[in-house]
């Protein structure tokens, strides 16, 4: 389906995004043929190393740590990360700074001119545009986060020099399969023959290992090819050829961040001749890294935690991280989710951590309604008494405002679930009261 862009000059980034959201008849349309054909017409290619990152959880953290360390080392870094919270520009970072509207519009215009009659989804179009923008920019390294799966994700039209798969767990079953073996095969699709393929999941599916071996990738596994040791003050990394000792813990909180940091250091080891990085630059980069919405503890009282945990694997990590925070009189949850997620699996990890639930609608047709979330909580056995409650709201902003109005300074508010839930709370915090 062609749009009227050919006949209408779009002046703003918001105009472009509004058109792209409506253009294709499917939000997700798996397959690389259409994207690859437009990529070839664009002539997108990189003159620098490319690192690609896939995984069920931990992709964003790994990308952010890579960016932070490489910036500390003085390199010019391009990062494609998704989804965004408040502004689309967050998805394209050039040397640590979000791309400008003008830069993005110029890249959009190039994709539009090259695509001819090829129909692209919002994600496919914007992925090509951001790759075009980075190819047009003088960079020393490009980091690309995969959207969904790997093998058929639009990002996979790019051949990475180093590919990382972080964790593999059950999510997006309609597209990737309903077992870790099926999902592992999909994520291993980003591996390339003769190039470094890293997996930091401590128990990688055999399908991932088999695929890497079949195509002749240089597979590096956590526990076999790289590992870490740690005490309360610091940690050490050991790889095939490099050791990094006396490292500070990453600035990102959470029990799984050392696994993500290990993947980062394994990638830097693989690229040590093209992109040498010193010990102090690694230390500084890991300490200074920031990433919104990943066990992000906001300043002030009551304590507010923002976390995009939307599947059981991520919810288990969030639950453990909450346990490590110390005592809070009451914990309020602001929770919204897509309906196709394993909501029962998420609640199984979280139900004993929350006293008062504020469940909310989200502005997407495939989102679970607050009523549906309330029903899931009831099915999970959430008690209804003086110490527990479930309240329904039409938006995460309203749910967050209610939680803030009820929580005392010694209480805690946990905003989790869909990116849209966390984004709503971020907007509420940003808006003047």
Image: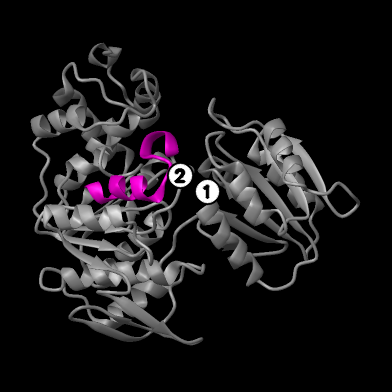
Q: Nearer the viewer, residue 15 or 189?
A: 189
Where is the N terminus found, in terms of image quarters?
Answer: top left
Task: Identify which residue is drawn at 36% across, 21% down.
Answer: 19
Relative to 12, is 143 above or below? below
The numbered mark at residue 54 is none
Would you say 312 lies left or right of 148 here?
Answer: right
Q: Position of residue 332 (x, y in %)?
A: 74, 53
Answer few, some or many: residues within 10 Å of disc 2's Cα (few below 14, many 20 plus, some between 14 and 19): many
Q: Position of residue 292 (x, y in %)?
A: 48, 56
Say which element carries label 2: loop
Q: Specify which label sits upstream in the sequence, 1 or 2.
A: 2
Task: Identify which residue is drawn at 15% across, 46% down.
Answer: 135
Instruction: Find disc 1 in the rendering and name its residue.
Output: 311
- Mark 1 → mark 2, Cα distance in angstroms: 7 Å
Part of the protein shown in magenta? 173-189
Could you tell me if the residues under marks 1 and 2 are in contact, i.e. CB atoms within 8 Å?
Answer: yes
Task: Identify which residue is drawn at 73% across, 35% down.
Answer: 375
Relative to 360, is 280 above or below? below
Answer few, some or many: residues within 10 Å of disc 1's Cα (few below 14, many 20 plus, some between 14 and 19): many
Q: Position of residue 150 (x, y in %)?
A: 29, 45
Instruction: Find disc 2 in the rendering and name its residue.
Output: 171
Q: Nearer the viewer, residue 315 or 141?
A: 315
């Amino acid at each position: 389906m062609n749009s009227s862009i050919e006949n209408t000059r779009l002046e703003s980034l918001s105009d472009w995004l509004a058109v792209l959201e409506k253009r294709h008849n499917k939000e997700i349309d798996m397959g690389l043929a259409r994207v690859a054909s437009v990529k070839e017409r664009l002539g997108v290619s990189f003159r620098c190393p490319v690192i690609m990152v896939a995984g069920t959880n931990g992709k964003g953290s790994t990308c952010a740590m890579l960016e932070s360390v490489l910036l500390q080392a003085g390199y010019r870094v391009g990062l494609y990360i998704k989804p965004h919270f408040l502004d689309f520009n967050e998805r394209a970072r050039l040397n640590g700074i979000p791309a400008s509207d003008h830069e993005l519009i110029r890249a959009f215009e190039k994709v539009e001119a090259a695509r001819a009659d090829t129909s692209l989804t919002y994600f496919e179009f914007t992925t090509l545009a951001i790759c075009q923008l980075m190819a047009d920019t003088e960079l020393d390294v490009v980091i690309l986060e995969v959207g969904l799966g790997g093998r058929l994700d639009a990002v996979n039209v790019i051949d990475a020099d180093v590919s990382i798969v972080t964790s593999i767990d059950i999510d997006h079953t309609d597209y990737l399969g309903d077992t870790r073996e099926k999902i592992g095969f999909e994520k291993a699709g980003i591996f390339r023959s003769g190039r470094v393929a890293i997996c930091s999941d401590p128990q990688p599916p055999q399908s991932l290992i088999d695929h890497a071996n079949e195509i002749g990738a240089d597979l590096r596994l956590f526990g076999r090819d790289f590992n870490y040791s740690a005490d309360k003050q610091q940690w050490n990394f050991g790889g095939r050829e490099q050791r990094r000792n006396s490292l500070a813990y990453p600035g990102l909180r959470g029990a799984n961040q050392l696994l993500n940091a290990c993947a980062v250091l394994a990638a830097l080891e693989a690229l040590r001749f093209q992109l040498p990085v010193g010990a102090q630059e690694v230390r500084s980069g890991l300490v200074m890294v920031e990433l919104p919405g990943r066990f992000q503890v906001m300043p002030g009282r009551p304590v507010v935690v923002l976390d995009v945990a939307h599947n059981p694997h991520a919810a288990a990590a969030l639950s453990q991280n909450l346990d490590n925070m110390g005592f809070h009189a009451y914990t309020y949850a602001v929770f919204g989710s897509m309906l196709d997620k394993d909501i029962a699996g998420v609640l199984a990890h979280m139900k004993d951590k929350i006293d008062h639930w504020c469940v909310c609608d989200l502005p997407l047709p495939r989102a679970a309604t607050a009523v549906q979330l309330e029903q899931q909580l009831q099915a999970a056995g959430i008690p209804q008494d003086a110490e527990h409650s479930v309240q329904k709201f039409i938006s995460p902003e309203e749910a967050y405002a209610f939680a803030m109005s009820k929580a005392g300074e010694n209480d805690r508010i946990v905003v989790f679930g869909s990116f849209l839930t966390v984004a709503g709370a971020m907007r509420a915090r940003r808006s003047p009261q």
